[in-house]
Image (cartoon, rainbow, N blue to C red):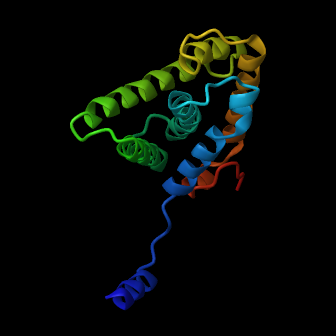
Amino acid sequence: MGLLSSLRRLLWRTAPSPVEPLYAAVVNEARQPGYYVEGGVPDTLDGRFDMVVLVLSLLLLRLEQLSEGNGRHPAAQLSADLGDRFLADMEGNLRQDGIGDQVIPKHMGRMMAALGGRLGAYREAGADRSALAEALRRNLYRGEAVADPAVDFVATAVLRLQQQLAATSAEALLAGQWGATA
């Protein structure tokens, strides 16, 4: 049966999904040590979750911009698929941490609400450094006291990511390429 599966894959080769490389890029960016060292993001489950949500939000906002509100645009579908991938990753992490089946839906609901709220906060802040710093203090740092240089470090990184994503063509993003200008 393995041989048949291999033959089918060769004969009916489909384009690889852009979701996995884009989600991997999100997680890779969110795990950069600078956020936790210079940026003062707590290196905890919550801090790492908040960083993934921050970076994913920036990507989803770029895809939202590309789709221009058209739910049938490929960027809108990619956005939905990335949301599904995020949920699958978070569910897997919860299960790995020993969270039981009966409690997982409650946690997942909170995570989706957090993503939605942060999307709104980061959309509203846009590229306004002051508004972005305030949104980061509320959402990334969860209102905890944090030094101004730490917030400035993360705000600078967010602005850089926004510029990088804005310079990435729709074709590149839809092909799963982050930072490409094809």
Q: Identify the residue at the far front of this view.
A: 98
Q: Quadrant of residue 42?
A: top right
Q: Position of residue 131 (x, y in %)?
A: 64, 12
Q: Position of residue 119 (x, y in %)?
A: 49, 26
From the viewer's perspective, tell me whether residue 80 is left or right of residue 66: left
Which residue does the image show at 67% across and 12% down from the upper left? Answer: 146
Q: Position of residue 138 (x, y in %)?
A: 55, 13
Q: Quadrant of residue 56?
A: top right
Q: Position of residue 77 (x, y in %)?
A: 42, 47
Q: Is residue 22 above or below residue 11?
A: above
Which residue does the image show at 29% across and 36% down from the upper left? Answer: 104
Q: Nearer the viewer, residue 21 or 46?
A: 46
How many numbered marks have been drawn onto this rendered protein structure? 0
Which residue does the image show at 65% across and 17% down from the upper left? Answer: 132
Q: Nearer the viewer, residue 49 or 121?
A: 49
Name the image quarter holding the N terminus: bottom left
Name the image quarter holding the C terminus: bottom right
Q: Identify the residue at the far left of this view.
A: 102
Q: Nearer the viewer, residue 140 or 117?
A: 140
From the viewer's perspective, tell me whether residue 118 is left or right of residue 25: left
Q: Is residue 79 above or below residue 58?
A: below
